[in-house]
Image: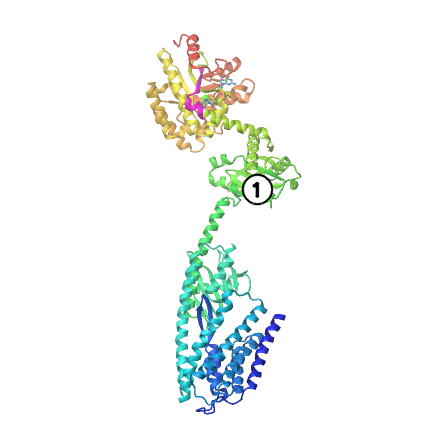
Amino acid sequence: MRAKALVLLIGAALLAGAVALVLALDPRPPFADLPFALPWFALIPAYVATSRFTIDFEFRKEARSITLSQLPLAIGVVFLGPVWHLASRVTAELISTVALRRQPPMKVLFNVGNSAIELALASAAIALLPTQLMPGPVIWAALLTGLLVNDVVAHAAFMTVMRILGVPLSRGAKLAPLAFASASTLVFTSLAMVSIAAIWTDPWTLLIIALVAAGLSFAYRGHRRVSARQQATEHLYEFVKDLGAVDVHGTRADAVLEQVRVLLHARTLDLALSDDARLSWQHYVSREDGPLRRFTTDSSGLSRAEAGTAAHGNDRMSAPLLGSHGVIGLLTVIDRLGAVRAFDIGDVRLLETVANELTAALERGRLLCDLERSATTDALTGLPNLNNITARIDELLLGGDELVVAAVAVDSFREVNDTLGHQVGDDLLLEVARRLRLCLPDGCIGRIGGGRFAIAVPSDSVGNDAAMFGLGLRAQVEGGAQLGAVGTHIRLSVGAVTAPEHGAEAATLIRRAETAMYSARHAQGGPVIWEPAYEVQGQRRLAVVTALREALSSGAIGVAFQPKVDARTGQVMGVEALARWTHPALGSIGPDEFIPLAEASGLMRPLTTTVLRQALTACKGWQRRGGRIGVAVNVSADTVLDPNFVTEVAALLTAVNLSPDLLTLELTEGVLVDDPGLATERMAELRAHGVKLSVDDFGTGYSSLTYLKGLPIDEVKIDKGFVDAVVSDAADRAVVRAVVDIAHTLGLRVVAEGVEQDEQRRVLHELGVDELQGYLHARPMPALEMAAWLRGRDAAVSV
Ligand code: C2E
Ligand code: CA
Ligand code: CA
């Protein structure tokens, strides 16, 4: 407020000074012998016109503009008395500042004061000359001096005002305007002198001068328009170059839209983007004065988006944003900046270009958004994925929260997927995800793979009891579910950890919760809370896998053999080869431990090869000594499905020179889970080579007896589980009897494994089992021991 008052004061002082100076001068025109009398108002239109018309320069990299007002000024100083001249000057200045440019009073007074003092100084300079002089170099020099003095005064006033207003100016900006003004004063005073000389001899020249000036200004305007367009193209190029991808929700959106608005010379810009369904429009409005504004409207007002680029009236224009799938939005600019003119056809083209570039950038932005979403979100459930949930939990931990982190597995997920198809599997996961979200509306839930989820909640929200939380979760999520046409029962395994007690990092916490979850699944019990012992197990697993890899390459895996005997005669019918491994440091490690690890770490193929080779070699050895004893080798599911396996078996048989019918491959029902068709095909191929096939652990899988019918097999091995209870449990006896009946109908032999007691042998024999295997007859033993055992056994096998 004080600053404005000061500026007003300076303006008033300049005006007052000018008036005082002019009043002190002779009121008559300076030259007595003027060829004609100019009416006082004649120069008003010239002043107004020249102040409206500015010439823009770039001077020392800064934009400067000058007016041609020194032209009428020089004429007025020569042809009018100073008082009347001042009156016409002030009138003209008021017309252009108040009526035409609507400047605020502060600016009006300052500008009036400035032009008045200019006039007064020029008049004073002329008045100092001896009168009666014809226009000539002396007048020219006087006029120039007066105007140069004025330049200094005006500059001083300008600098003072800038200081008062607190506008910071660089060193260059302080002196450059003065130098520039002086130079232009020199040029225009010279021009004015030429005009004055011409007018002196013929007043009508004034008209010609006016016409020439109008023509020049017209040409200049045209030139300026072209160069402005060139500049716009350059700006557009710069804009496009660093446009990249725009995400309207991102922070850069403000800056980009601001840039677009400036590029289009608009006071206001409205970018309306449609949602996918085109039901509503999201507006982003950038204004010259103020931050980006966002709001939503319904579709009714924007049907014109489809209509194409259009200039509405003379103050706004719009262009549709034509994306690859139709109109995605409408770009509208309102009020052209610079007031000189309204939007024209050139602006419309610029708008179209900008709209196209913006569309491309927005589509790139959307693509990036989608990519980012798919990198952080599980596509099926829309829940955060492993990376994302890990990051979120880490964030909570950084905030110092005490958390319960749970890992949840859908128990029957794999089975549902395998037997009922992926569609039902997906439905199952969606249903579980829905229920989890329902019972933890603001919990941190993510899908971490397969049928597994991770959940984090603040400890105090669950009473600091991870086990209770797990139980509650199960209670709320488990239960019947209808998945399309399929009814099923959802069951969960839950493992949990607490943070920071069980770990400081999300990755550790999730891993430990999963370990606990697997343990819960194994035990088929309630939720399991992680404990350090699990880690030791994990470390052992790692150590065992590493050692197993070494053992396989160094040939440290051996094989033991266990005989199968005829249930009726006790005659040895064959042997089963079982992998054996004694590690120098870890001691003897059982197949129950290392076989699953080999399966999980891709070591099954080399393991099978070494067992197979040792088994076939041993078999060949016994044969050489006259014993025709078949050997059975266990083969896991993946191995059977491997197309190279058939070739390998055939090659090994050839290498050892052994009849294929001496080899039996024992497969479990698991082989058939993923792709029964393919498995059956592979089995048929093996059998076509003369190899026999046996179904191991029969009765533990989920297949029914009837599936035996279609399989290319020779033998069924009833699992030890049934043998254990065959004496005491009538139901198990019934199962064994049914298996025997069906197998015999299909022409298959039935073997019972794990026979430890004579009573079991008797019952199994009665039930019709063909062969028996178990500690009752012999424990698994090394090849040499096996040979000795066979020799001492019976005469039927003359080894
Ligand atoms: P499996 O094929 O069911 O083998 C029979 C298992 O029962 C053997 O355990 C054997 O030592 C044991 N056993 C035999 N008779 C009796 C008995 O009367 N009482 C008791 N309690 N157990 C008896 P092992 O050698 O520990 O093998 C365990 C499992 O490891 C095998 O079960 C088999 O599934 C797998 N396995 C062993 N060697 C190999 C192999 O070379 N390849 C593959 N893929 N799996 C193998
Ligand atoms: Ca077996
Ligand atoms: Ca078995």
Total tally of numbered discs in the picture: 1
Where residue 236 appears, as percent x and y from the top left, is 42, 62
- Looking at the image, is 68 positioned above or below residue 665? below
Q: Nearer the viewer, residue 289 or 177?
A: 177
Please say whether residue 672 is one of the residues in the magenta stretch. Answer: no
Quick one: quadrant of the N terminus?
Answer: bottom right
Question: Can the viewer see residue 1?
Answer: no
Splitting the image into 4 quarters, where does residue 616 fall?
Answer: top left
- Looking at the image, is 99 positioned above or below residue 486? below
Where residue 13 appears, as percent x and y from the top left, is 59, 78
Please say whether residue 559 is one of the residues in the magenta stretch. Answer: yes
Q: Secondary structure at mark 1?
A: helix
Question: Can the viewer see residue 162?
Answer: yes
Where residue 515 appears, as percent x and y from the top left, is 55, 32
Q: Residue at x 36, y 15 (%)?
A: 620
Q: Which residues are magenta?
A: 549-564
Where residue 703 appears, as percent x and y from the top left, is 47, 29
Quick one: quadrant of the C terminus?
Answer: top left
* Three-letter residue code for mark 1: Asp
Badge 1 density bin: few <14, some 14–19, many ≥20, Cα 10 Å: some
Q: Nearer the viewer, residue 215 or 323?
A: 215
Q: Which residue is mark 1?
A: 394
Q: Residue furthest front?
A: 130
Give the color scheme: rainbow, by chain, secondary structure or one colour. rainbow
